[in-house]
Image: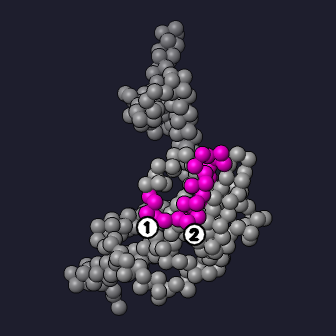
Amino acid sequence: MKRFSLLLVIVLFCSCNYFKPEQKPESIARVGKSYLYKSNIAKLVPSGTSKEDSVLMVRDFINRWASQKLLIEAAERNLSDKKKGEYNALIKQYKIDLYTKAYIEEVVKNTVDTLVTQQELKKYYDENKENFKTNGTLVRLRFINLAKDNPRFATIRSKFFDYNKKDKKFWETYALQFKSFALNDSVWVDMSQVYVKLPVINPENRDEFIRPGKKAEIQSNEDVYLIKIINVIDKNQTSPFEYIKPTLKEVILNKRKLELIKKFEKEITDDAIKNKDYEIYK
């Protein structure tokens, strides 16, 4: 009888071990029949991470992996066949969209002409300028922010307001003494940037200073701001060509890409019909 009992225990023990999944080499976790391996986390921890932080990162990754596996298994068991069919159709369509989009982008990248000449930009601007309105006020200006006790202040002030591009060396010499400056007055900037660069100007006093041709000398604590406004364009006016030029280039390139995609889709369909790979049955 004792021999029978011992045999029964051995059989039960063996049976339990038989039905328990065996740990696979290099595996670090298991959920059902899915295994997580050391290779899956080989590049998880950045070099230089402390041992304590590494352990936390790995443990967190394993827990998230397990949660996702358990949730997907629960979803597959409990969602209705109808609902799973709907999601499988979405997954299939997403794969189609993802693959075709990536392929078309690769074709376009290797085919489209990205050179846009000045003449093309100007022509497109002239034909479509009414579509490019300013979202806010644009300003062309130059300014200098310097200490008011600067020993060469009078000379700097005089040359600033009687600005001459031939004085390039003068400005290169004294620029290091300025706390901030912008001397390229051919560039249009948004009013929001003016507020950032010139904190002495704000929405309350902007009408006093932001006027074409306005010269201003504004003191702020130990500093002085020398400002010359060249031109101003208000909101909802036609954007100047130089300001909108980067946008024009993107618009022209996108137009080329769309035309190329349309042409490519037509050619691939025509070729399939010609090669009898595509037929519509009546």
Q: Nearer the viewer, residue 114 or 272?
A: 114
Q: What residue type is labelled 2?
A: Arg
Discs 2/1, front: 2
Where does the image place residue 176, in percent across and percent down from the top left?
51, 46
Question: Magenta stretch containing residue 152, yes or no?
Answer: yes
* Residue 248 coordinates in the image, percent (x, y): 46, 76
Residue 190 appears in the picture as rendered: no
Query: Which residue is located at x 29 percent, y 67 percent?
Result: 110
Q: Which residue lies furthest to the right in this view?
A: 204
Q: Name the residue under label 2.
A: 140
User: Dots 2 and 1: beta carbons under 8 Å?
Assistant: no
Is residue 174 shown in magenta?
A: no
Q: Which residue lies furthest to the bottom in this view?
A: 282
Residue 97, disc: 1
Q: Within the image, what quadrant is residue 269 found in?
A: bottom left
Q: Looking at the image, can residue 105 be seen?
A: yes
Residue extending furthest top?
2
Q: Identify the residue at horizontal 52%, vertical 10% (top origin).
A: 1
Which corner quadrant holds the C terminus? bottom left
| Magenta-tinted stretch | 142-168
Give the image location of residue 232, x and y in percent.
Answer: 62, 74
